[in-house]
Structure formats: structure tokens, C-alpha cells
Image (tube, coloured by chain):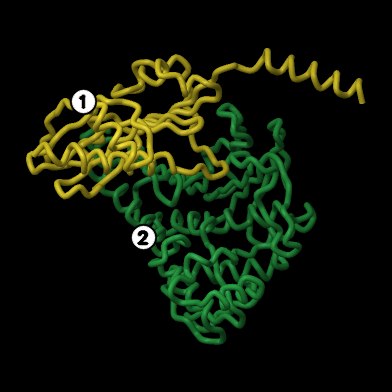
Chain colours: A green, B yellow
Amino acid sequence: MSSENKYNSLERCKPLLGTYVEVTLSGLVDDQSLIKASQNVFRAIERIHNMMNFHDIKSELSQLNRKMLISTNIEHEVSSELYTVIAMSVDLHQKSGGLFDPTSNQFKHLAFGELTLKQIGFLAVNLGNLGDLSLSGSNVVNTKHLCINLSGIAKGYAVDYAINSLPKGIDYIINAGGDIAMSDWQNKAINVKYSKLPWAVKRHKMKNCAVATSGNYYHSNTGHIVNPVTKKNHAFKGSVTVFAPQVVLADALTKVVLLMKRSEAKLILKAFNAYAIRINRLGLAKQV
Amino acid sequence: MLRRNLLKGLFATAASCLLPLKYAYSKTYLTIEQAKKILWPSELLTEYPLTLTEQQAELIEDLSDIRVRNLKLNVWKTKSGGWFIVDQVIGKHENIDIAVAIDEQGKVRGIEVLTYRESYGDQIMHPKWRAQFHGKDSSEFLKLDRQIKNISGATLSCRHVTDGINRLNHTWAQVLSKHV
């Protein structure tokens, strides 16, 4: 950092969203301006984290989940931010034939004081999927009992949302646990991690302003993604990386691309103006 | 089948000779001085040397359920009774320096990651390897230091840092809060 008004840069990292969030800012501004801008970015990310935290019973998402577990066919008003993420999820659920489905059956932490044991038992086997959620104006309506976990894509949305807090003239790279957005992306590259070994990274030119990667190398099982249509564990090794116009979309599409045949994945990537690569355990990359 | 197993074994042996046995990657975000300016922007910080007794360390371990690895605390104090702490947290493969600001009420007002280190190999568990990082700027000592920027990968949990913060909260409650 420097106090003079020349091209300065600042890089900070905080534990947020359950992972590490790196914010790199630069521009023809003084260091105080960069610190202030980075504070705004972290505050914006924290706001989305608090709003969409699945494990926090006080979050807006948890309050919506409680309502959807108790009742059906009632319109629920949600904030514009939560509505945006839900609307994107519903759209991708439809276009992917149900392969993108952030609904969850891990709802017991929400049931305390609200549901009887009998009701919990009933819900455990009768929950709907995202196809049972629709949009009505700025509200959401569930036709079956539901519980949504936006954890993965909320991280991506938090990055998209935080970018709006930045003033013009400041270049940025925001990395939330591997979900990245950057300005001036046409001249930049990223390093894709394809294994838990520290040296296992593959350099790749940015193909859009946002990128996200899914990989299971930090997990002991061979697959950590469940196919929501077949309900089976999908085994894969290596990683899938998607470049897209928004981080939330890139993150969501990694899940879909992992589960789809290559020909189907190509179509859905084209529909969302996105680009994807798969990298195997040996670091060999192939465009999807 | 025997031939395939033999070829696999030969390949693994050759690969292990080529791969570095102990590889370290690190990234420094802020120096201690930079973190002080961010976490306590308008306060003067005075170094406050403190070493935990064995008894205090045991109590903090019992309360937080996290091991206390260093009895010596790197702490600075503000005039208003707030604290700036530099500490180290260790995960399975990560060794991270953090700076934490705690106000006079014991509330965490900010956390910054100063340096993130990742290694593959067993040196992260060795006290001597860890000791070289304690309380220092990373630029002084890393032999293998590779700056890899803009990594997109599977999400790494920050659980170890949050565990470390929990330990520091108990350190404040049991020790620091008594130094007014």
C-alpha cells in the first residue's frame, strides 16, 4: 500500500461464507480509498451471508424454509436479493431437466419448536424439489413442502452483489472460496486447482468475467455430488470449471456440467453464454 | 494383471522421485503494521508482552476444545482497552497467520488473514517448522515460496480459523480482560 495518488493496490483476505474471501483492489486512488472500498465489499458479502446462511436459523432463507416446511400454496414475500437467487435457481432447474436442485432434506435444525416429531417424520419422505417452487410477482410459492440450501451459489451471488459496491475506476478480483469475479478479465488468467496437492494447478485464460470450479479432492469419498434426479452419488475425479457472465451462474453450472453428458452440457453452456473445462487428476484439461 | 500392477508400481516410483517431497505454497496479504491500521485505524497500539501459564493454557484448551500451541502471546493494547492479537492457526495442510481485533467488551471487531501457507507433507506438524513462523513476517524465512494468484478450486473450509478465533475469545475472557 502507498499513500501517494499513483496506481496502488491492496489485497485482503477474511474468513467469510465458511471459506476464505480474497479481495484484491487496485487503481489510481490512495490507500485509504482502497481500504474503504474493500470494507464495503466485505460488508456486502457479509450481508448476503447473513441473509442466505442455511445453518443460521435467524437468516431470511431459514425463515422462508420454516414457512415452506409448515405450509404449501401460500405466497411468501422475500427480499429482492433472495428472489434473484431463487429465480435463477428455478430457471436453471427447468433448463437442466432437474439436474440443478438446491433443495435439501437436512431441515431438522429448523424444526425446533415448530414441528412435531410426527410432522418431521412425514416431511423426511415427502419433501418436494425445486420444480415445486414457482414465482408470483416478487413472491415465491411452494406447492409441496420444501427446504432450500443455497450455500454453494449464495457464495457466487455474494461476489456478484459485492461488485456493485465498488466505485468506477477501481479494478478488482474477488475470490470467495474459488468463485471469482474480475474486471478487465480479457487480459487475465486463473489457476485452476484440480487436486488437493498444493502444486496441482493449471493455468487457463479467462473466458468471461466470472469463474467457478467444483472438485471433490478435499473429500474422502470419490464423489460428493448427488444426482438430484436419480438420487445416486455421482463419482468423479479432478474438477470442472465454468466461465460465465455472473459468478452465481458459473457456480450453479458446475454442478450441472458435472452430471450431464458432454453433448447436453454443450447446449446448456451455450444457452447461458458460458464455457467449461474438465481437468482430470493428472492435470489434463479438455473443453466441455 | 500382474504386468499392469508392475507397470503401475514402476510409474508410481518414478513419479515419486520427480515430485518434491515437501512442497510449500504461501501467500501474504498484509503485514502486521498494515493489519493494525485496518483493524484499529485511529488507535495507538502498544505492545504488551504476555506469556500464558500452563494452568491458563489448560483452562483455555478445556473451554475452547482447541489446543494452545504457543504460550507466548503476540498482543498489543489500545488506550481504550481493546486488543490486537497476532496468532497462528493450523489445519490439516494449512498454517495461517491471523490478526484479530477484540474490543474492551470482548467482542471481535475484525479478523484479517495475514499469511496463508499450505504444504503437503508432514512438516506442518513439526514444532520446529511451525516455530519459525510464529510472530514473524513470512518474507523472512520461507525457503520455498511460490506465489500462485487467482486460484479457482473446490471450496476450502475456514473452520480452523474460526476455531482459532474461539480459542482467542477464551484467551480474552480468561487472561486479557484481567489486564486493564
A201 vs A243: above or below: above
**Residue at horizontal 60%, vertical 49%?**
A243
Relative horizontal placement of residue B60, taking residue B159 as reference (left or right): left
Q: Cα distance, mark 2 to mark 1?
A: 37 Å
Q: Please name whichever residue, A139 or A59, is drawn nearer the observer in this view of the structure.
A: A59
B47 vs A38: above or below: above
Label 1: how many Cα within 10 Å (few below 14, some 14–19, many 20+):
some
Look at mark 2 in the image and give the residue it sits on. A47
**Mark nearer the viewer, 2 or 1:** 1
| Type of the residue with mark 1 | Thr
Question: Could you say where residue A167 lies in the image, as x and y percent from the top left?
Answer: 32, 53
| Type of the residue with mark 2 | Arg
Q: Please name whichever residue, B170 or A281, is drawn nearer the observer in this view of the structure.
A: B170
A82 vs B154: above or below: below
Residue B147, numbered label: none
Q: Chain of mark 1?
A: B
Look at mark 1 in the image and give the residue it sits on. B51
**Residue at horizontal 40%, vertical 49%?**
A16
Query: Are the numbered discs 2 and 1 placed on the same chain, yes or no?
Result: no
Q: Chain of mark 2?
A: A
Q: Please name whichever residue, B169 or A161, is drawn nearer the observer in this view of the structure.
A: B169
Label 2: how many Cα within 10 Å (few below 14, some 14–19, many 20+):
some
**Residue A27 in view:** no
Relative horizontal placement of residue A281, taking residue A66 as reference (left or right): right
**Residue A99 in view:** yes
Q: Secondary structure at mark 1?
A: strand
Question: Could you say where residue B180 lies in the image, as x and y percent from the top left?
Answer: 8, 39
Question: Could you say where residue A202 lies in the image, as x and y percent from the top left?
Answer: 62, 33
**Residue at horizontal 55%, vertical 38%?**
A190
